[in-house]
Every structure is written in C-alpha cells, then in structure tokens.
Amino acid sequence: MSDCGTRAISVIGFIGSVFSPWYRWSGRRNPQNHVCINVATYGPGGRFTMTDRGASALRQTNARFEVGPSMMRWQGNELVIDVNEVSGPPVISRVRGQIRLTPSAITGVELPLTADGAHVWRPFAPRARIEVDIDRPGWQWEGEGYFDANFGTRALEEDFSYWTWGRFPTRKGATCFYDATRLDGSELAAGFRFAEDGAAETIALPPKTALRRSFWAVRRETRADTGARPRQTLAMLDAPFYTRAAVETQLDGERVTGVHEALDLRRFRNPLLKPMLAVRVPRRRNWRFA
C-alpha cells in the first residue's frame, strides 16, 4: 500500500494457478502447465492482469521465478519484480514496470492449515518497504510491503469452505490473522505478532468482528479490540467469491490499517463461475523465450 493510502498493488506468482478455470478444467494434473504472475493495481487507473500460461513459459532458479514476459528475482536483499503483462477487461492495456520489495527481516514461521499439512502458510516478510514504478502517471510511489506464500497439495475447495486473512502494520512491527472453516466443520484461528527483526510470537486473539459485506455480498469479518468497529478504507479486488480491501481496525488500543481478504470457497465450487473467470483469466499455452 502507498504511504498516502490511496493506491495499492498485489503480485502473486502461481505454479498451479488455484483460481484459474483452465487449471480446474485440466484436472489439476500438471501444475507446471498452469503458471501465472498475477498483477493487480488498485486506486486511480487500477488494472488487473492474470494470464494462465503453459509449461514452456516457466523458468526457475534458486533466485529467480520467470513466467513468460514477467519475473521475480532476488537481487541482494531485495525482491525485484519485473512486470510486462496485459490487463483484462474492462481496461485492456499493457502493464509494464518494476516493483522492488525490501524486507526488514525474513521469518522462519510456518503454519500448517490442515492437520495433515496439505496446506501451509509461510509469512516470509511480514514487514517490508515497497517501491513501485509502473508506466502510468501517478504509479510511481513508495509504501508498506509484505511477502508471503501458500503451498498446497490439494485444491483449496477440497478442504475449506471459508477463510479470512489480514495483515496489519503496527508501531512495533506487524500483526497477522488467519481464520478458516474447514469442510469438516473444524476451525483454524491463528494470530501472530512480528517484530521488525522478524521475531514472531503467537498472540491471544481479539474477537471476530463483522465488516460490511462486499459488492457481491461476500461475508467479511476480521479481528478487533472489543467494542471497536473495523471499516474498509480502500476497495481492491471484489469478485463473487473473493474480496481484498484495505481495512482499518483497532488492535491493542492502536488504530491500524492493513490488507484484508475473504474467500468463500462454497461459491468458488460453483461450476457456473468458471466460464465467468475465463473472461478475466485468458489462457496462453505456448511461449518462446528470446
């Protein structure tokens, strides 16, 4: 998020693009044949890119993840993301630029989301600075950054019906919450406090507090001090099954603003959604590196 709070960007690298209808229709047999670097910009002139690419577009080393014309690479202690994508409707245009993320520290935290470890969350850098340089007026800014990863050996909708996640920068570091309802009815409820040096501790969870539903009426809730009222401050992604937004809440008496997500996997299982997603997520099977 920008320091002024009016713009934001998210970049997700996928091997096995979990929200791609093409990957679902393929039977999810070969995740390397459904790769993507998804870039979304939020605020004035925001755009969304998510192209499902085939195995020929994937190149990897220990320090580089490359998908067709875009890549993520470690350069010293910076994660450098070079973007060259085409946004989907309603605004179809090329999105070019570079994002640089500098973590304050790298953590060793790993949270299994299911008892058998089929899904794992890794908050690598809960606190970071980000520099954005995208080829549009007003899209050169600095702000608050974050870097994590999710790993899984089964489809999300096979194990979960609903989850929310939130990451909030604080005066002393950052606080993250992960809440999920599994298909068997059991609940995951986890909270972590991270210091600037990456030191982590689990925390007593403040109560769940409802947020206003999204445009598509996705249920939303986050954590907040007793009696506090969270509120959305910047709309980001709003889909029939998934929302992302900047949310202001109160934690330990401190008003904080961070990124919040809610995911309704019961809706995502609906086969009628897949053709709708295909409009926003084009498939490009072949790629040749120069």
Image (cartoon, rainbow, N blue to C red):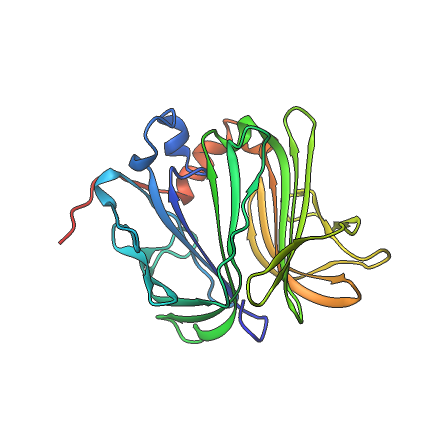
How far across and how far down the image is residue 55, in percent?
A: 25, 38
Observer-nearest of 246 and 256: 256
Residue 91 lies, with reference to residue 279, above or below; the image says below
Residue 92 lies, with reference to residue 27, above or below; the image says below
- Image quadrant containing the C terminus: bottom left
Apparent side of residue 140 relative to residue 251 in the rendered image (left or right): left
Residue 269 appearing in the image: no
Apparent side of residue 163 relative to residue 249 in the rendered image (left or right): left
State the residue at coordinates (66%, 65%). 257
- Image quadrant containing the N terminus: bottom right
Residue 11 appearing in the image: yes
How far across and how far down the image is residue 235, in percent?
A: 60, 58
Residue 130 lies, with reference to residue 110, above or below; the image says below
Apparent side of residue 285 relative to residue 265 in the rendered image (left or right): left
Q: Residue furthest right?
A: 227
How far across and how far down the image is residue 146, in percent?
A: 51, 60
Apparent side of residue 208 relative to residue 13 in the rendered image (left or right): right
How far across and how far down the image is residue 210, in percent?
A: 76, 48
Observer-nearest of 171 and 19: 171
Picture quadrant where residue 198 is located: bottom right
Observer-nearest of 272 and 193: 193
Residue 180 lies, with reference to residue 246, above or below; the image says above
State the residue at coordinates (70%, 26%). 185
State the residue at coordinates (50%, 26%). 271
